[in-house]
Structure formats: structure tokens, C-alpha cells
Amino acid sequence: MIEVPEPDLRPAEMIARAEALIPAIRAEQDESEHRGYYSERLHEQFREAGFSRILQPRRYGGYEFDLETFYRVMVAISTGDPGVGWCLTLGSSHAAMVASHFPEEVQAEMFAPDGDFRCPHPVAPTGKATRVDGGYRLSGRWPYASGVPYATWVFAPAFIEDGPPDSHVFAVRRADIDMLDDWGDGNVLGMNSSGSNTYVVEDLLVPERFVVPFDWFDPPMPTVGIELHGNPLYVGRIGGPYHASLVATMVGAARAALDEFGGPIGERQTTFHPQIPRREFHEDQRVYGLATGMTDAAEAVLYAFAREYLERATQAVETGERIPLSQDARWWAMLQQAGGLAAGAVETLMHRSPPSTSGRGQRMGRYFRDVTTYRQHVSAQQSDFAVRNTALYFGLTDRWLF
């Protein structure tokens, strides 16, 4: 058992803490983008606020709040800087996966000594492992490990040589990896502050207890987490929660873009007669109104998913029956629509903004680049998923992604 830092803390207070930090996060946008991730100062503020403990079991020093609370906090952080939100979200969300899938003794070790825990999960199995006495020798290179700069552990997906055809997740200590300096400062178009660095592992002995099958899209029931913690939050399905984490950053990006368009950009004078503040010009009002509706809809979908996921997880625990993969597919598709709406809101505002707002160091341009990077993400490809999803809907396959 690990003591919870603030046993009486409530979700509303956690959300308020995140909202209060928006100005401080925005003040460091340029530095975060140049560095590739947020500052040590912000990290300490996030750590003291307890943001990484939201989905972590109380047994191991977490608050064990629900998904909606987590997403509301991450939307607020992303409203300060979408890249920073991406980094914090993807470093903090996987505490729920540790709680869901790893043995009790491993959980105790991973969350030790004080419950301060962050763990990225680059899903592609780009590592190789060889079985040896007591465990595996693991080597590999994992790009796009969002959240790794402040990680305490990492998930390293890999195939086992001469083993089962499906990949496994290896839990590796932060001290046993090398993080490459390959992110930020324009190395990619957007999300330069997301801490999506590559990490490398060379011939590391990983004890067998730290290796579990990557069956997290359709795990058997009951999961370790349900038996150990008794909370449906730890049903351990990722077909929905993983993409919702990305959507939370997009909703934050849209909120940030609305602030920029309605604030500094709205104060600018129109180019032609009558010269009035842009926020008073009907064409700019039209764009702002459309973007607001898109953002509100995206955020509503995000939180509706969080509530429905918990309802279905609770039902699965009570009946002992797995949630059907077709439901996961519908959730993912619904969340893709939400992400597209939020990204579209930013694009709508950007297309109406003056060209000078797209330059380096300009906030609207940064938000536009960030949502473009989301659009490129493999999990955001709506057309590709629509085909896979329909095969499930029609019963033409019993597999979905992995």
C-alpha cells in the first residue's frame, strides 16, 4: 500500500487546478516547442497537483478518479498547449493499464516507492526479445514514445523470437532506456512540445513477471485489475480510451484557438472599409460561431464516451462477459469524429486568420500545425477504420486491429 497524497481531494478541485495553470503553460509555449517537451518547472507543478495519479489505483497512491475527470483535466492542460497536453496525457493515462494487466507484485514495484508514476506506450511492436533463464533479452528502438521525457517506466512492445505470433508488452524502468534527442524545434510539423522522443533498449534482461500479452483490445475477463482493485475502470480495454486521450488534446487545441481568434486576433482591425475590430465583423463572427459549435460537440462526445465506457465496463464486470469488439469499434469511430470536429474547428479559424498568424512563434499557427499532426496519426484515419469497423459490424471478422 502507498499513501494517497491528498485523501480527500475531489475531481472538481483537480479540474480547477488544471484550468488555473493555463496561463503558465501558454507563457512557456515557445520554450516547450524548442525543447521538445514541457519544462521541469511545469513538471513539478503537474506532479504536485497530482495529474498523473488520476487513473492510478488508490492502493498504490493514486486518486482512482473516473475517465471523465481525467479527460477534463487533460483538455484544460491542452488548452494551455496541445503538445504539452499530449505529453502529459500519454504519460499519465497508462497507469490504468498497469493496474488492469500486470500482476499484483509488479504493480507494487512499478508504482513504488511513493506512487509517482508516468509511462508512455508506443503501440507498434518494434522490439525483439529472446527467451533466456528467468526472462527475456530485449532490444529495440521505439519512436513516438509520447511522454517519455518525464517517464518513470516505459511500455516496450515486442515480438518474442520463436514465441507466439502476437506481440507482448515489456515493462522497462526509465533508467534502463536511452532517450534520443530527436523531437521538438521543428523536427516534425506539429506537436513539437509533445515529448514524443524515440527511446532505445540494448540487450536488456527483463524478468518474466514484467512481460504480459498485448491482448488489451479484447482481454479475458476478469482482468487482474478487476480482481485486485474491484473497479470497472480496470477492465483494461483500450479500444476507445487510447484514442480518447488524443481527442482530449484536440478539444484543448480548439479551445485555445477560439481564445486566440476571439482575443488578440479579434482585436485587429479589418483590412477594408469599414475598419472595425474583427470580432465585430459578421464574417469573422460566422467563423467563430461555427468553430464554437464544432468544439462544443467534440467535447460532448468525448465525455459521453467516458460515461458510456464506464457503464459498459460495469455491466461486463457484473455479467462476466466481455464487451464485444464491435462496441470498441463504434467508440473509436465516434471519437474519431470528435477529433475531426475539434481539428476542423482549428482549421476553420486558421483559414480565416491573417497570414501573419501562421509564422513561427504564433499561437494560431502552432495550434494549426498540432491538429495537422493529429490528422496524420494512424489512429485518426477515419476511412481506414470505417472499413475495418464494418467488417466487425457485419460479423465478417473476429479480429480488429492487432
Image (cartoon, rainbow, N blue to C red):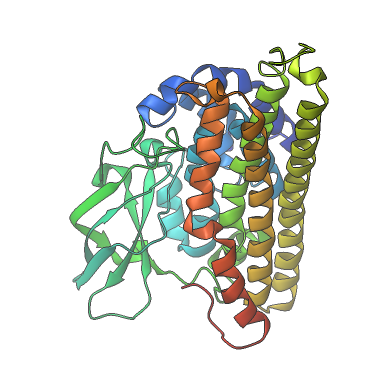
Q: Quadrant of residue 136?
A: bottom left
Q: Report x, y in % for residue 399.
A: 53, 81
Q: Is residue 211 above or below residue 46?
A: below
Question: Measured from the top left, where is residue 400 in percent x and y?
Answer: 54, 76
Say whether residue 355 is left or right of residue 16. Answer: left
Front residue of this view, candidates 250 and 153: 250
**Camera-side residue of 83 and 364:** 364
Q: How many marks?
A: 0
Q: Position of residue 116 (x, y in %)?
A: 47, 38
Q: Residue at x 35, y 29 (%)?
A: 185
How far from the left and from the top, in percent, is residue 287? 75, 34
- The outermost residue toward the front is 273
Q: Is residue 216 above or below residue 142?
A: below
Q: Residue at x 56, y 33 (%)?
A: 367
Q: Quadrant of residue 39?
A: top left
Q: Which residue is drawn at the image coordinates 28% and 39% (left, top)?
A: 182
